Structure formats: structure tokens, C-alpha cells
Amino acid sequence: MNAHDADVAIRARGLTRRFGDLVAVDHVDLDVPTRHVYGFLGPNGSGKSTTIRMLCGLLTPSEGEIEVLGLRIPAEAEALRRHIGYMTQRFSLFEDLTVRENFEFLAAIQGVSRPRQRIDELVEQHHFGGLQQQLAGTMSGGQKQRLALACAVIHEPELLFLDEPTSAVDPESRRDFWEKLFELADAGTTLLVSTHLMDEAERCHRLAILDHGVLVADGTPHELTGRLQGRTFIVDSSDPRRAQKVIERLPGVLGVAQIGNHLRVLTAARETDAKGMADACRSIDQALAGAGQHASTRETPANLEDVFVAVTRQETKRPERAA
């Protein structure tokens, strides 16, 4: 691996992890830029958590090389721990301690200099002024999430790992949480966030999509939608459920999803000219007319969900990386 690049926080080459005959992570190459919110998108079981654990030095790779903040992992994992934070999916702080006591305990564990000043800063930044004496176990999901994030950065890490951190909170709390993530990135922290939520993936500066342990796409959200080989259509039908069954049987259709009163159709068609798109729309309408349904089809811009469906359903899964 090359010498450490100050603009790259994480670099992995050929990263692989096997559990017996199961290949959980399969020869992943990864470059995570500094000061970015970098997303890991993938379904449950895709290898996101396993990859994060290897990057942190918590799990030894079966193959491959890892460099994090200029340190070789897992050989220099102990030195790395002083420079990273980790926020798990489940709330892992002490529920029978108050908010302030959790801060004080973690400040002592992390060896934070001037702990009282640092805790006061976090109390103000994360709006815990009136909650410092509340037991952590009695707080709402959104409050617990804020506390977990604040505790994860108490030692001001250069790199923060977040493993599906918003899975149990309401939409407003998720929105506020992401604002905090961007504030951290603006202040110089690199963040790697795993998620299976498309709206969160769209927020990331850059994104990797994992499927069955394989990195199947990598780039900015704009790059990924721009490279999509298939085409996306909206179908308006008087009976969307029946129309969906008809469209799913058409050749070249990768996915059909009902969105309210219409259908979103992803096809493998590569037509880009106006005539080709018109023909594609007409073929869907004709198929539905043959099934006794009146419908109207039009092209629509691709989104990350379309990209996700396309790259996870392709027959040969190989990395698709931006230049």
C-alpha cells in the first residue's frame, strides 16, 4: 500500500473476511476521504458491520490490507483507538447513570484533558442543559441517540464510525442527528456511516453500496445516479396492483414499486434518445392495454433506490467506481 495520503482517512485493498465457508466481506477496495460523511449502504447481512469492525481493528481480516489515519490495521489498532470514535446501533451507555455521569465516566476512560470544560461544551452543543441529572435509561430514543453521539466524540476523534445509528428514532430526531454529523465534518472529523435507509444515503458526500460482501458501487450520489445503465419510468394506472404484476413479467424489468397511486419501474433498457424512450414507454402501455388496463407511462429521473436495485440485481457483481 502507498504511503499515507493526508486527504484519505481510510484505505483498504482486497479486504476479505471469512467465517468458515461464509465469505462475509469479499475483496473490498475502499478509499474514504477526510472531512467527508461517507455512507455504507446495503441490506442487512451485506457486510457493512463486519467491514466497520475490521477497519476499527476489532476484527482481523482473513485477507487484505488496511490503513486508517496512516496506521496499519490490525497491527497498530491500539494506537488507532485514541483517534477514533464508535457509535453502535444499540444504545450502549449506562442507563442507571445520569447524563452527566455518563459523560464523566467516558471522559475518565478516554483520558480527556480538562474534562469539565469538554463536558460543558457537549452539554451545550447537544442541548442537555436541563437533562444533566436525568437517568440515561429514562430518556427518549432521540435523546439517547444524541447522548451516544456526544459521548462518542468526547475525546474529539479524527474519525468516527457509526453503525446504523438512527434505526430506532423518529424522522425529526434523524434530521437533527444528521445536522450534527455535518457540523462534525465541517470541523474536520471524517465520518463513516452505515445505513439501509435511502434518504440517509442521499445525504452522504460519498457512498459505497455493499451486497453479499461485495462492493458493487462507489461514488457520490450524483455520480451513481448518472452512471445508472437502466432507465426509470412512472406508470399511472387505474389499478396499480394488477399493473405491477403485468409489468414485472416484462423482459428487461429489474424492479417495480408502488409509490402512492402510481408505479415506479426500473428497466435494463439503455435508450437515451427521445425515440427510444418513447418506444419504451409505449411498450409498457401496450402490455397493460393487452391485459385490459388503461395506463400512461413517462420517464422520470433516477434516484439512489434505482441504483441500489440495479447494482444488487445484476448477474455479475463487480465494483463500479468513480474516476
Image (cartoon, rainbow, N blue to C red):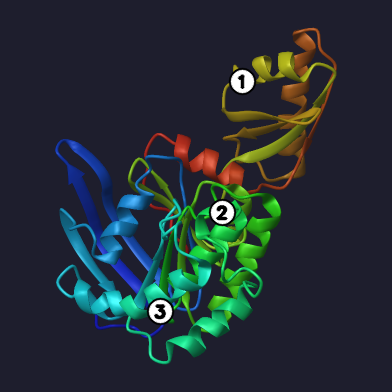
Proximity of marks 2 and 1: CB atoms separated by less than 8 Å: no
- Where is residue 196? Give x, y as percent: 51, 46
Element type at mark 3: loop
Element type at mark 2: helix
**Of discs 2 and 3, which sits in the foreground?**
2
Which sits earlier in the primary sequence, circle 2 or circle 1? 2
Residue 269 in the figure: left or right of residue 69? right
**Of discs 2 and 1, which sits in the foreground?**
2
The three-letter amino acid code for the residue at tag 1 is Glu
- Where is residue 292? Give x, y as percent: 80, 7
Element type at mark 1: helix
Residue 230 in the figure: left or right of residue 162? right
| Residue indicated by mark 1 | 248
| Residue indicated by mark 2 | 138
- Where is residue 178? Give x, y as percent: 61, 64
* CA neighbours of label 3 inside 10 A, class few (<14), some (14 to 19), many (20+): some
Q: Residue at x 19, y 56 (%)?
A: 61
Do we see residue 287 in this rendering? no
Q: Residue at x 60, y 36 (%)?
A: 269
Q: Nearer the viewer, residue 296 or 194?
A: 194
Q: Which residue is drawn at 44% across and 51% down?
A: 90
The three-letter amino acid code for the residue at tag 2 is Thr
The three-letter amino acid code for the residue at tag 3 is Pro
| Residue indicated by mark 3 | 157
Q: Is residue 11 above or below residue 119?
A: above
Outermost residue on the bottom side: it is 114
* Image quarter hosting the N terminus: bottom left
